Amino acid sequence: MRRKLSFLSGLLTNIFLAALIIAMYHATQPGGVLPVSAPQYRGSGERAALQFAVSWNAAAIPDILDILKDKSVKATFAVSGEWAENNPALLMRMAAEGHEIASMGYYPDMDGRIGWTVKDVRRANEAVRKICGAEPAIYYEGSRNAVTSTLAAKKLKLTAVSSTIDLLTAKGTAADILSRLPEKPIEGSIILLRPTAACKEALGGIINAIEEKGIGLTCTGNVLGLSE
């Protein structure tokens, strides 16, 4: 009996995960809608968002902020609590220059059940709030379990997000990164970047290529309709 229940439980879990993957795929297509148990992968409108995942290999942040300021572009910085506490001046600069501060949790390379994730994200958000006064409304789930992350975010009254396009800025050169841009960027896209040296070199070209196609750049919250 126990073996049968275990089999049924595993089967239902696999069916749920398969349905979630299919739903995520369709959600990135025009008009797609995600179930409540999945992170938001895409917004709407004739704009796209630049979303930086900031937890490691972030030495290029000062130059990236300079480029964004020069281009008059506001972006989203999803920071880990650990990074925030180790880099308070940069976090305060991000907030002071009008960028959106999102959360990656305190230790984004770790994962756990819902209760653990809630505590981890709460700790990160408290660190951000103490340093720069910002109150993150968005939680970027990164490599963590998407369903667990979304349910934990819901408990904290946050919006869980992933990305529509990942330019894999931790791999390759600036030219490689630019080659990963879709020929026609998807409107409402959340474009994921990591603040590497190669990303810094490619950033101006990324911004120009997107804006030349008539798509404005803004924060993730704006694309999702949370900030306006």
Image: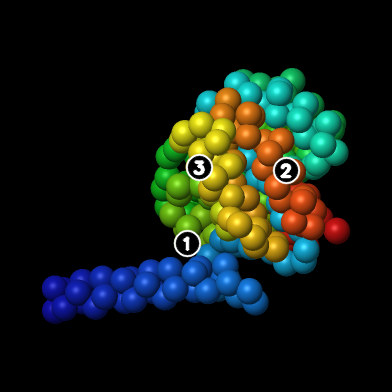
Helix, strand or loop at label 1? It is: helix
- Which quadrant of the structure image shows residue 31? bottom right
Task: Using the image, tell me which numbered label, if any, was put on residue 168.
Answer: 3
Give the spatial CA distance, label 3 vs label 2: 16 Å
Whichever of callouts 1 and 3 sits on the residue coming sooner in the sequence is 1
Q: Residue at x 63, y 34 (%)?
A: 202
Q: Is 68 positioned to the left or the right of 141 in the image?
A: right
Q: Residue at x 59, y 50 (%)?
A: 181
Give the spatial CA distance, label 1 vs label 3: 23 Å
Location of residue 14 in the rendering, given as x and y in whole percent from the top left corner: 31, 71
Helix, strand or loop at label 3? It is: loop
Q: Is 145 positioned to the left or the right of 95 in the image?
A: left
Whichever of callouts 2 and 1 sits on the residue coming sooner in the sequence is 1
Q: Amino acid at mark 3?
A: Leu
Q: Amino acid at mark 2?
A: Ile
Name the residue beneath numbered marker 1. 147
Q: Is residue 137 visible?
A: no
Please name which of the two marks, 3 or 2, marks the residue nearer to the observer: 2
Q: Residue at x 80, y 53 (%)?
A: 216
- Which quadrant of the structure image shows residue 179? top right
Q: Is 1 positioned to the left or the right of 76 in the image?
A: left
Whichever of callouts 3 and 2 sits on the residue coming sooner in the sequence is 3
Query: Where is 86 relative to 132, above or below?
Result: above
Q: Is 225 positioned to the left or the right of 55 in the image?
A: right
Helix, strand or loop at label 2? It is: helix
Front in this rendered view, residue 2 or 70: 70
Instruction: Indicate the quadrant containing the C terminus: top left, top right, bottom left or bottom right.
Output: bottom right
Q: Are marks 2 and 1 in contact (CB under 8 Å)?
A: no
Q: Are marks 3 and 2 in contact (CB under 8 Å)?
A: no
Please name which of the two marks, 1 or 3, marks the residue nearer to the observer: 3
Name the residue beneath numbered marker 2. 207
Location of residue 213 in the rendering, given as x and y in whole percent from the top left corner: 75, 56
